[in-house]
Image (tube, rainbow, N blue to C red):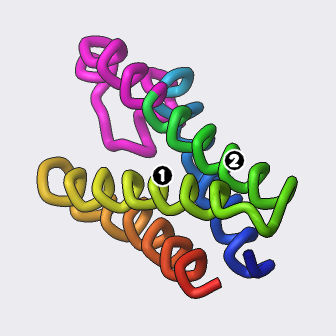
Amino acid sequence: MTTAATVAVVLVALLHLYFLVLEMFLWDKPFGRRTFGLTPEFATASKGLAANQGLYNGFLAAGLLWGVSRSAANPANPDGPAIEVFFLACVVVAGVFGALTASRKILWVQALPGAVALALVLLS
C-alpha cells in the first residue's frame, strides 16, 4: 500500500475515534451540544442513542486500523487492503446514509474522507 493510502486510512480511523469521543462522552456536554447543535434536553434524552452511534464509529476505526496493521505486517498479503476496502466502504455508506437522513454535512465530514481513502487504497 502506498504511503498516501496508509496516511488516508489512518486519518479516517482517527476521525472516527474523534466521533466516538464526541458521541459517547461529550454528547451532553457543552462542546458536544455545540458541535451537534443540540438543546440540553434533547442531548439528555438521546444520550444512549448517541453512545450507540459512537460505539459503531469505534468499530469502524478498529477495522481500519486492523487493516493497516495487516498491510504493514506483510505488504504482500492481500488481507490488509481487503479489510481496509471493506471498512472504508462501510464508512462511505454510513456517511451517505447519514447525509440523506440526518445532516448533509455528514457527506463532507465522513463520506468524502472515506471515499478519498478508498480510492487511494484501490489505486495502490
Q: Which of marks 2 and 1 is nearer the N terminus?
A: 2
Residue furthest front in the image: 77
State the image coordinates of residue 5 (x, y, percent, origin top left): 68, 76
Label 2 amino acid?
Leu
Q: Nearer the viewer, residue 89 or 81?
A: 81
Identify which residue, 77 or 48, lies in the foreground: 77
Residue 32 magenta-highlighted: yes
Magenta part of the protein: which range? 27-55
Q: Quadrant of residue 72?
A: bottom right
Whether residue 11 is visible here, answered yes or no, is no
Which residue occupies the extreme bottom position in the image?
A: 123
Of the pair 66 and 36, the residue shown nearer to us: 66
Residue 83's place in the image compared with 24, above or below, is below
Q: Residue 75 falls in which quadrant of the image?
A: bottom right
Q: In which quarter of the image is the C terminus?
A: bottom right
Q: How far apart are marks 2 and 1 (CA)?
A: 10 Å
Query: How packed is label 2: few (under 14 Cα within 10 Å), some, or many (20 or more)?
Result: many
Where's residue 95, x and y in %? Answer: 32, 57
* 86 in magenta: no
- Please give the residue where the numbered disc 2 appears in the rendered image: 65
Please name the predominant secondary structure of the magenta segment in the image: helix
User: Mark on residue 87?
Assistant: 1
Element at label 2: helix
- Looking at this rendering, what residue extends furthest in the left direction? 101
